[in-house]
Structures are given as C-alpha cells and as structure tokens.
Image (cartoon, helix red, strand yellow):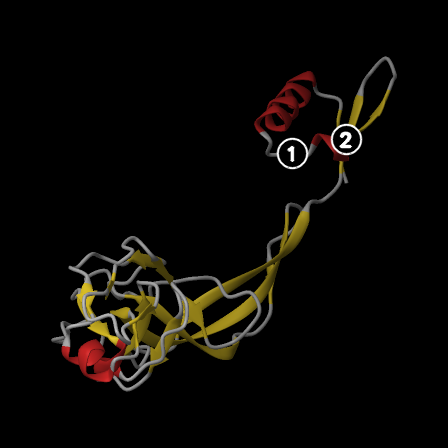
Amino acid sequence: MFYSKNPISILALAALAVAGVIDTQSFERSITANETIKIPCAGGPYTQTQRVGDGNPHQNFVYKQVSGTTDCAGNPGGGASISNGRTVSWSASISGTVQFITGGFDVSLSTTTGYTNSFGCSTPGGGTQGGSLCVFERIQLTAFTANTRTCEKTTCTPDKCGDWANNVVIYAPNTQQSSCFYDNYQVNLPCDALDAEHYVYNGPAGGPQEIPC
C-alpha cells in the first residue's frame, strides 16, 4: 500500500485520477486534518506474442464471397453484383487471447476487398452450368509461427510472466493484394452468403510475395 500526506503528491495523484490513469473508485479517503489517500496495487493479466525463429512463413489464401447468390437457371441475362469494402481480418490457429504481431512481415490486422465488374450468367461458369452464381475475391495471407505467454501486470512490482509456450500460427493479410476475382465455378466453391470465407493452405513458402491470379 502507498500512503501520502504530501500535498504535492496528493495533487499529482488527483491529476492522474482525472486523466483516468487511476481508478477513482479505488480511493479510500479518511476525513482528517491531514487527508490520507490509500491506493491499492492495480493489476491484471495480459498476453505477449513473439515470432519463433524466422517464423517459417508461408502464403495462404482466403476466398471471400463478395456478392450475393444469383440463380442463373433460365436467366442468361442475370448476374452477381460485387459488394466491395468487405473486411478480412487476421486470425490464429488456437482459441483464446493472442496478441497480434506482424512478425516483421509486411502484413496488417485486416484488409478490405476491392471492386471489379459484375459477373454475369453468360460467363463460362454461370452460363454453362445454369445454376447458382456468386463471386469471390482471393485474399493473400502470410502464415507464420509464434509463441505466447501470460503476464501479470502490477503497479507495485515488476510484471511477472510465465514461460513462452503454446505454439500458434498467425494468419495475417498481406498489405499488398493482387485483386483476384473468380466466380464459384472457377474456384469450385459453394455459394453461401455474402462475407463467407474459405481458407486454402496450399500456397508457396516465404513471406509476402506477388502470386498471379
């Protein structure tokens, strides 16, 4: 516990309380001639993440459905309109709290899909099949290996951290994307709903790189 009868210290602590650094609810005040402020040690758990070695990076893909589904049966003039600006976010191979890191790669927390002309039922896929038609954008991800650990934060003593453990693969969208669009027949994927995502883990080794559509 920390006690202060120094007016300067009290003013400084009050300023911290106003700034939100100290929770005013934690103050215990005794009304005496010399006011005493009692501040408990604040704390709480948090996680840290670090890359393992070079991260063993690989390129993976997520095919994001960026249109609704159109029934092309008996509708040769129909088509699927693109809804641009859809979000693809980073993910991890384990559940629980994982702190995002770039691992030193040119990746980001998320990316948004672009825009292309609508796909019509007269395209090779929709026209010949005469069934459902939808559009996907291929988003490139860099997958790399990391470790995590849990720490306990406290204002009274140095933070205490456990051992590094729990190997995790982080899948982060590349900063640069190739704007590759396909209909469901070209990539052999089902039409679900707008924003549906299908992950493919067969990309080449290495960090962010341009992969032709």
Nearer to the camera, 188 or 153: 188
Q: Residue at x 50, y 71 (%)?
A: 148
Q: Nearer the viewer, residue 210 or 191?
A: 191
Give the image quarter of residue 29. top right
Residue 195, label in figure? none
Judge whether 123 appears above or below 128 on screen: above
- The residue singled out by tag 2 in the image is 27
> Is the Cβ of the residue at disc 2 closer than 8 Å to that at disc 1?
yes
Q: Residue furthest bottom?
A: 202
User: The residue tagged with tag 2: helix, strand or loop?
Assistant: loop
Q: Residue at x 15, y 73 (%)?
A: 122
Can I make out residue 59 in this image? no
Name the image quarter holding residue 158: bottom right
In the image shown, does 2 or 101 lie closer to the viewer? 101
State whether residue 154 is above or below residue 78: above
Q: Position of residue 129 (x, y in %)?
A: 24, 83
- Mark 2 vs mark 1: which is more N-terminal? 1
| Quarter that holds the C terminus | bottom left
Residue 115: x and y in percent read 20, 56
Q: Is residue 19 left or right of residue 145?
A: right
Find residue 117 and report its image quarter. bottom left
Q: Identify the residue at image location x=55%, y=65%.
A: 97
The residue drawn where x is 31% and y is 73% is: 63
User: What is the quadrant of the N terminus in the image?
Assistant: top right
Q: Which residue is mark 1?
A: 22
Instruction: Tell me the amino acid under the disc marked 1.
Output: Ile
| Residue 137 x %, y % | 25, 68
